[in-house]
């Protein structure tokens, strides 16, 4: 909560202080540029300095009253935000992604890729905010291709299925990367995402990427249809993880490549979840319409149980992706133009920002893991 409030303070301080206390916070330098050149410490000190100046003008009694009001307000806000608002139910995933696509806020900040980014050790040591937030997502796709053994040299004519394609950023990237002889099909439950993905494919001149509304648990494709099955951050929303895995293995051709990235909870079979763990997981399930998560180990067991796959490679990419959660918040702080003119979306944006912080903390303490999987299908 402290990080979330600090970020909110940076975003709001200039507007709030200038209007309430007549403090001059204007500059000819764009906000994004000014803030991005400052360290978190400098940002924090800047906010504190303005608040201290304002407090000196109104005196101790007024300052005490404001502090008390702020404390009560903080408790009240946390009470509201800790109550998840988007519980999973039939149709909720399509509904939420339709809404996210229509309001445009997610695309404004996250670009065409609705998944976490990749930050190597050097970039983390230098400070994750120095990396371009959108580039981190492209880097993630490149690293996921490496894990799956997918390249233009080996897959230039491949038929690729992108399970849970979002607005098609990865599908189009793969279609461009693998060349005009490759064919990429993206599926999603959201009609708005299909429409937007198709628009962008036309705008970018990517005719070998196609999109359709389809349930990943009951795909219309025949057995052995695709050379590559790609799934990035779609398993989280699947109410039946076994059916999800079984269907992907079914439509993959013998000798084909399977690669998946998904948020996982830690394996609780040896160390059961505490009451806090259960509360935190319940919030993460119900704020972003997830039915439930499972562990990396449990996913591997589901793949193995199909009996059609060769040895599965697994990994936890938490270290490489965890920066994305707070980086997502900071890009909104630095550049509020994506939401500032949409007042009806303010509460939703605050809730999303708070959930991003809760996600960061869950991954940081090991309750959540970032599961990566790669395997090939046995030859018949």
Image (spheres, helix red, strand yellow):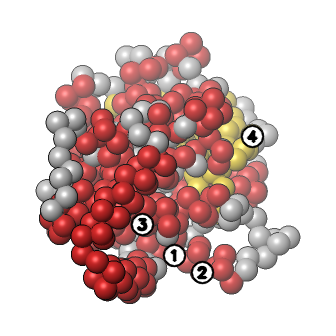
Where is 318 relative to 288, above or below? above
From the top left corner, tell me how far across and down residue 9 is, in percent: 35, 62
- Residue 5 disc label: 3
Q: Secondary structure at mark 4?
A: strand
Q: Are marks 1 and 2 in contact (CB under 8 Å)?
A: yes
Measured in 3D between alpha carbons, the distance from the residue under mark 1 to the one under mark 3, in whole angstroms, is: 19 Å
Residue at 65% across, 48% down: 318
From the top left corner, tell me how far across and down residue 267 is, in percent: 76, 65
Residue at 49% across, 53% down: 325
Q: Which residue is mark 4?
A: 313
Q: Nearer the viewer, mark 4 or mark 3?
A: 3
Q: Nearer the viewer, mark 3 or mark 2?
A: 3
Residue at 51% across, 75% down: 283
For residue 321, what is the image quadrant? top right
Residue neighbourhood size for the residue with mark 2, other residues' Cα within 10 Å, grouped as few (<14), some (14–19), many (≥20): few
Q: Which residue is mark 2?
A: 279
Residue neighbourhood size for the residue with mark 1, other residues' Cα within 10 Å, grouped as few (<14), some (14–19), many (≥20): many
Label located before the other in sequence (4 or 2): 2
Count the labels in the image.
Answer: 4
Q: Which residue is mark 1?
A: 283
Give the side of residue 343 with respect to residue 86, left or right: left
Residue neighbourhood size for the residue with mark 3, other residues' Cα within 10 Å, grouped as few (<14), some (14–19), many (≥20): few
Residue placed farthest to the top in the image? 153
Label located before the other in sequence (1 or 3): 3
Measured in 3D between alpha carbons, the distance from the residue under mark 1 to the one under mark 2, in whole angstroms, is: 6 Å
Measured in 3D between alpha carbons, the distance from the residue under mark 4 to the one under mark 1, in whole angstroms, is: 30 Å
Q: Secondary structure at mark 3?
A: helix
Residue at 42% across, 33% down: 132
Rendered-image quadrant of the C terminus: top right
From the top left corner, tell me how far across and down residue 315 is, in percent: 72, 44
């Amino acid at each position: 909560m402290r990080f979330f409030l600090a970020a909110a303070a940076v975003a709001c301080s200039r507007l709030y202080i200038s209007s309430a206390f007549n403090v001059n916070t204007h500059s000819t330098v764009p906000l994004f540029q000014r803030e991005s050149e400052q360290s978190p410490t400098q940002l924090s000190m800047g906010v504190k300095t303005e608040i201290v100046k304002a407090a000196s003008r109104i005196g101790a009694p007024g300052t005490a009253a404001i502090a008390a009001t702020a404390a009560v307000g903080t408790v009240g806000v946390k009470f509201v935000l800790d109550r998840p608002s988007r519980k999973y139910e039939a149709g909720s995933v399509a509904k939420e992604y339709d809404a996210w696509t229509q309001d445009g806020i997610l695309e404004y900040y996250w670009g065409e890729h609705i998944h976490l980014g990749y930050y190597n050790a050097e970039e983390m040591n230098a400070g994750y905010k120095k990396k371009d937030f959108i580039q981190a997502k492209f880097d993630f796709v490149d690293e996921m291709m490496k894990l799956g053994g997918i390249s233009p040299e080996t897959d230039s004519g491949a038929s690729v299925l992108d399970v849970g394609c979002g607005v098609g950023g990865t599908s189009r990237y793969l279609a461009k990367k693998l060349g005009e002889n490759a064919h990429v099909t993206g599926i999603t439950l959201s009609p708005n995402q299909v429409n937007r993905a198709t628009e962008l494919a036309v705008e970018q001149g990517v005719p070998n990427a196609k999109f359709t509304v389809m349930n990943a648990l009951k795909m219309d494709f025949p057995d052995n249809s695709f050379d590559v099955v790609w799934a990035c951050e779609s398993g989280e929303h699947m109410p039946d993880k076994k059916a999800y895995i079984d269907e992907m293995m079914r439509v993959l051709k013998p000798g084909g490549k399977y690669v998946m990235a998904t948020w996982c909870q830690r394996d609780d079979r040896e160390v059961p979840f505490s009451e806090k763990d259960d509360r935190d997981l319940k919030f993460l399930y119900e704020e972003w319409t997830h039915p439930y998560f499972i562990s990396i180990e449990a996913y591997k067991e589901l793949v193995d149980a199909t009996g059609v796959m060769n040895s599965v490679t697994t990994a936890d990419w938490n270290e490489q992706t965890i920066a994305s959660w707070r980086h997502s918040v900071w890009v909104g702080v630095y550049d509020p133009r994506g939401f500032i003119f949409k007042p009806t979306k303010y509460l939703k944006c605050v809730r999303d920002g708070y959930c991003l912080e809760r996600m960061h903390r869950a991954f940081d303490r090991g309750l959540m893991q970032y599961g990566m999987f790669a395997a090939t299908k046995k030859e018949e």
